[in-house]
Image: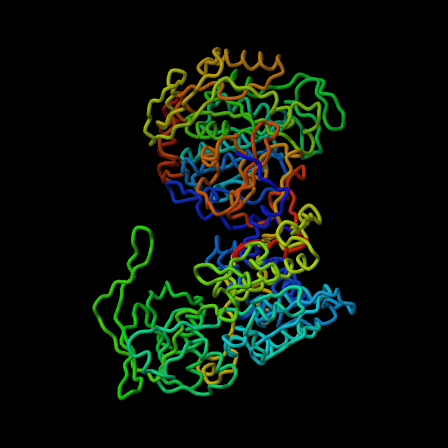
């Protein structure tokens, strides 16, 4: 019986700047179904955090309810974590971020958590421009309750039990673009080459970063006729551009293909290097991105990659002009200066 | 990048490093699992089938399996395989009901064996159950060859050796002890269908430096000394003994001399301590018994005072390695005088074929070793086969046993008018799934860090008092079970099937050792760059799949796979399974040379 992953590791495993191997970024051994896309997503997060040399104790993992929201248990066991109420992850993340803006907020949600019960919460956290990485593991079904169709399932598909999806699907990337997210991307759990650079860029991005990850449910949505099965996604996935993440300290060298590449400098000085595969690709225009997504969908294709990036965006704290120091680091007297100051403020309104 | 050929057992056998490293290809993980289940008799029989002398080898084997052990790649020390073999031997019940039955009606073929060492006895054991009349000629009064004459009783008790030799002798082996064959030509004219020569390497080398002639019987070869002690011709030694040489014979000589009453024993070696040929544990034990090992001294002369040996003169040397890695000894100029009343020379040994006429069709090479076919060990005279030290010079018991298996197959084919090379059959193999449930395997798949258990021994001051006191006590059951649980079950293979893989990467993600890679097809150099851990141990095989649906291939680096089965547990479609390798004829997997 093996519910514990061995502590043995490859003797020649690379170490990052902190002297840690990727194994130091793992969590408990997953209890999701064997072959769940969420485990691949977990592994991509582990890889991204390791490669960026992120200090695990400076991360907060926040999630709602669902298979996807169980996933934070499976990465960064040394980070802070909060498994919150169904659909309420954005509120909890907002509260945490207000109190301590110095942590990295890696948040996980699912199609039910974000597109159904938490749809309103999702919309408002996008509007708020909270500095966080919002990842949705999107498999089109409610796996934890035995495979009912989710709001993100394409209209006309059937679930494993044969039920037809009668309603239009919600595309969370389109929603995020409309609501003013400053980093929007879609990827596939089975394509770590694309996913890992996107997660790294989302971490480096200041402001709200949204990644919708198609993550097949092997148990309830991997059949013929599903548009979220491994086989279907492998066959219908397409991308507008290949994005590569260049960390801050890497010397940027020109290469022969530089003509096709666009470098976008992120907030922390790292570079998102985008190589166009499609002439119409443009990562600076949200409405064009929405059109591209819809156009590919009408052709039966799943468009992935970085859709939109506004590298100089402001976040919630900038917009509200909060103080630079994290609230949890302020002394009691500064945070709560007492009656004298309060009466001064009240006096000013009279 | 080519798909790995899994239609033959060789890929799988290469992954079972201990079994591959064992010249006789003993199924090591199989018998360790049996020990873990306290099935000692079964564990013994698995050994007995492959290596014929589990009790002997469980004490004095050279242990080529241990440096190969996979645990040694992820932890400080390998599994104590040899000691576990002894556990099987110590704890077994009566095995006689399980020994092969000997047919009453013989097949009419007569085979002569010359020498009663491990190779000959292996040939006898394998041929007697097939109905052969096997006749053994041995110049000593008892069987065993070098196992008896050169390995002292404190490492290998006589009872253990006798027991395992008797299993074979009692199969109906016709023994002629004390009968030395002095002419192969004469024997060839006798009524034998095949003759096996297993006479070992019985001649100790001398060191012919000044004083050698005058030293008389105060200078002896190590192997002669050990044989004389073993057969009780020598019962005591003078106070000061010098041993020359750094191999296991030298270690046995010095420890024997100590037990025979020597007050001061010095072992002088030309090489450095590290480069000494003796097994590391033999060196450790000698030092523990208070014997001085003096490396880096080259002998200059025997010192003879008043016609009597009183010591030796050495010069200090330095080991210098040239560009090619060849060692060269350079004198430092320092001279060392060591007192001694007896010198035991253990600097090598040679075969002895004076009794083989050179005009009877047996060709010898430049080193005076017989020319043999590597596969069949048949000499240039079709009726005559060689094996063990007689064939390849001094090696070890387990290589000798492996040769015995090769020769037995060859002689059987030859006597049935088949070609021992061309008509040699290979082993077939099965891969048997070990799955018992979603998280359940028929073997202990959970692995953890565990230090090697040390074998208990008698107190060193007690050990050196008597020749027949066995030093090592062997593992008790508790230690044995602990040590057995360190085995990683390398014979239970990760078997991949392309047709069911959906490329979900679950196995790649869960593998604690990062062995599994799904990568784009590329040439070998580009392939490695895509690996999760790009540094390769080039001695270890890769398992490469055929292209999958997306065009990617699965490449598994077998280097540090711990056979924990997590890949197979995580696989949603059963594309991975843990399957046990079963070789239907391990003897037939022994091919060519000594170490393959």
Q: How many marks?
A: 0
Residue B109 image offset from top left, x and y in percent: 71, 65
Q: Is residue A309 visible?
A: yes
Residue A253 image offset from top left, x and y in percent: 33, 25
Q: Nearer the viewer, residue B179 or B67?
A: B179
In percent of the image, x 69 and y 48: which residue is there?
Answer: B432
Q: Residue farthest to the left?
A: B333
Q: Is residue B376 above or below residue B277?
A: above
Q: Residue farthest to the front?
A: B359
Q: Is residue B588 above or below residue A171?
A: below
The way the protein has been coloured in the rendering is rainbow
In the picture, measured across the screen, residue B42 lies left or right of residue A125, that is right
Q: Is residue A72 above or below residue B84?
A: above
Q: Nearer the viewer, residue B440 or B241?
A: B241
Residue A294 image offset from top left, x and y in percent: 58, 13
In percent of the image, x 50 and y 32: which residue is there?
Answer: A93
Quarter of image, res B311:
bottom left
Q: Nearer the viewer, residue B525 or B37?
A: B525
Residue B308 image offset from top left, x and y in percent: 30, 87
Quarter of image, res B372:
bottom right
Image quadrant in which the C terminus of chain A is located = top left
Quarter of image, res B486:
bottom right
Q: Nearer the viewer, residue B63 or B310?
A: B310
Q: Is residue A33 visible?
A: no
In percent of the image, x 54 and y 11: which residue is there?
Answer: A291
């Amino acid at each position: 019986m093996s519910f514990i992953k061995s502590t043995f590791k490859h003797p020649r495993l690379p170490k990052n700047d902190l002297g840690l191997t990727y194994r130091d970024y793992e969590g408990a051994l997953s209890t999701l179904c064997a072959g769940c896309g969420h485990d691949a997503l977990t592994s991509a997060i582990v890889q991204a955090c390791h490669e960026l040399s992120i200090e695990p104790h400076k991360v907060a993992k926040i999630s709602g309810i669902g298979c996807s929201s169980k996933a934070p248990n499976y990465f960064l066991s040394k980070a802070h974590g909060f498994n919150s109420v169904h659909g309420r992850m954005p509120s909890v993340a907002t509260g945490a971020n207000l109190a301590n803006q110095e942590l990295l907020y890696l948040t996980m949600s699912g199609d039910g958590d974000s597109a159904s019960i938490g749809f309103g919460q999702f919309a408002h956290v996008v509007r708020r421009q909270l500095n966080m990485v919002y990842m949705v593991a999107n498999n089109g079904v409610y796996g934890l309750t035995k495979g009912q169709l989710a709001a993100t399932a394409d209209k006309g598909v059937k679930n494993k039990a044969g039920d037809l999806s009668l309603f239009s699907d919600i595309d969370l990337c389109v929603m995020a673009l409309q609501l003013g997210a400053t980093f929007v991307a879609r990827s596939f759990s089975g394509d770590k080459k694309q996913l890992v650079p996107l997660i790294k860029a989302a971490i480096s991005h200041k402001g709200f970063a949204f990644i919708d990850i198609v993550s097949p449910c092997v148990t309830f949505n991997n059949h013929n006729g599903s548009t979220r099965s491994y086989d279907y996604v492998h066959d219908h996935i397409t991308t507008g551009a290949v994005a590569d993440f260049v960390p801050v300290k890497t010397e940027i060298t020109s290469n022969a293909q530089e003509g096709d590449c666009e470098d976008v400098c992120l907030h922390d000085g790292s570079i998102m290097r985008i190589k166009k595969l499609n002439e119409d690709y443009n990562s600076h225009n949200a409405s064009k991105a929405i059109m591209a997504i819809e156009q590919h969908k009408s052709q039966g294709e799943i468009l992935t990659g970085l859709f939109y990036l506004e590298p100089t965006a402001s976040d919630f704290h900038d917009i509200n002009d909060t103080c630079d120091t994290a609230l949890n680091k302020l002394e009691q007297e500064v945070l709560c200066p007492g009656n004298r100051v309060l009466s001064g403020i009240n006096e000013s309104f009279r | 990048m080519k798909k790995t050929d899994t239609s033959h057992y060789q890929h799988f056998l290469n992954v079972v490093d201990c079994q591959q490293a064992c010249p006789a290809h003993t199924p090591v993980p199989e018998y360790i699992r049996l020990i873990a289940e306290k099935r000692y008799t079964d564990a013994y029989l698995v050994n007995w089938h492959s290596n014929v002398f589990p009790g002997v080898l469980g004490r004095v084997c050279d242990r080529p399996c241990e440096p190969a052990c996979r645990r040694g790649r992820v932890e400080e020390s390998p599994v104590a395989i040899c000691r576990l073999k002894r556990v099987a031997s110590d704890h077994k019940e009566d095995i006689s009901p399980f020994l092969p039955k000997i047919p009453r009606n013989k097949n009419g073929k007569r085979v002569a064996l010359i020498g009663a060492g491990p190779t000959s006895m292996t040939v006898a054991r394998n041929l007697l159950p097939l109905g052969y009349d096997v006749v053994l000629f041995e110049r000593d009064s008892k069987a065993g060859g070098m196992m008896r004459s050169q390995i002292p009783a404190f490492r290998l008790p006589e009872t253990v050796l006798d027991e395992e030799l008797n299993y074979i002798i009692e199969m109906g082996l016709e023994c002629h002890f004390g009968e030395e064959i002095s002419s192969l030509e004469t024997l060839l004219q006798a009524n034998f269908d095949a003759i096996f020569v297993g006479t070992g390497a019985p001649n100790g080398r001398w060191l012919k430096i000044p004083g050698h002639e005058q030293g008389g019987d105060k200078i002896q070869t190590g192997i002669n000394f050990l044989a004389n002690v073993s057969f009780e011709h020598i019962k005591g030694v003078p106070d000061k003994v010098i041993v020359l040489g750094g191999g296991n014979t030298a270690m046995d000589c010095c420890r024997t001399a100590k037990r025979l009453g020597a007050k001061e024993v010095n072992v002088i070696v030309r090489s450095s301590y590290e480069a000494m040929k003796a097994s590391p544990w033999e060196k450790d034990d000698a030092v523990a018994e208070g014997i001085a090992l003096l490396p880096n001294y080259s002998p200059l002369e025997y010192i003879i005072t008043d016609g009597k040996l009183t010591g030796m003169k050495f010069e200090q040397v330095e080991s210098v390695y040239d560009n090619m890695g060849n060692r060269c000894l350079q004198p430092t100029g320092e001279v060392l005088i060591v007192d001694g009343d007896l010198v035991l020379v253990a600097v090598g040994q040679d075969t002895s074929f004076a009794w083989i006429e050179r005009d009877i069709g047996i060709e010898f090479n430049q080193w005076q070793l017989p020319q043999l076919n590597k596969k069949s060990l048949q000499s240039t005279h079709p009726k005559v086969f060689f094996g063990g030290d007689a064939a390849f010079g001094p090696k070890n018991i387990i290589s000798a046993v492996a040769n015995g298996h090769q020769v037995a197959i060859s002689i059987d084919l030859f006597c049935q008018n088949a070609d021992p090379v061309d008509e040699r059959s290979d082993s077939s193999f099965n891969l048997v799934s070990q799955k018992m449930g979603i998280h359940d395997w028929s073997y202990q798949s959970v692995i953890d860090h565990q230090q090697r258990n040390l074998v208990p021994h008698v107190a060193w001051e007690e050990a050196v008092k008597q020749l027949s006191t066995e030093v090592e006590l062997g593992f008790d059951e508790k230690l044995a079970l602990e040590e057995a649980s360190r085995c990683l079950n390398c014979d239970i293979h990760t078997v991949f099937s392309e047709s069911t893989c959906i490329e979900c990467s679950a196995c790649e993600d869960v593998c604690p050792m990062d062995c599994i890679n799904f990568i784009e097809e590329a040439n070998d150099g580009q392939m490695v760059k895509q690996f999760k851990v790009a540094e390769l141990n080039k001695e270890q095989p890769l398992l490469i799949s055929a292209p999958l649906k997306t065009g990617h291939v699965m490449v598994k680096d077998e280097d540090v796979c711990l056979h924990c089965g997590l890949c197979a547990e995580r696989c949603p479609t059963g594309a991975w399974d843990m399957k046990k390798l079963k070789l239907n004829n391990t003897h037939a997997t022994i091919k060519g040379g000594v170490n393959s």
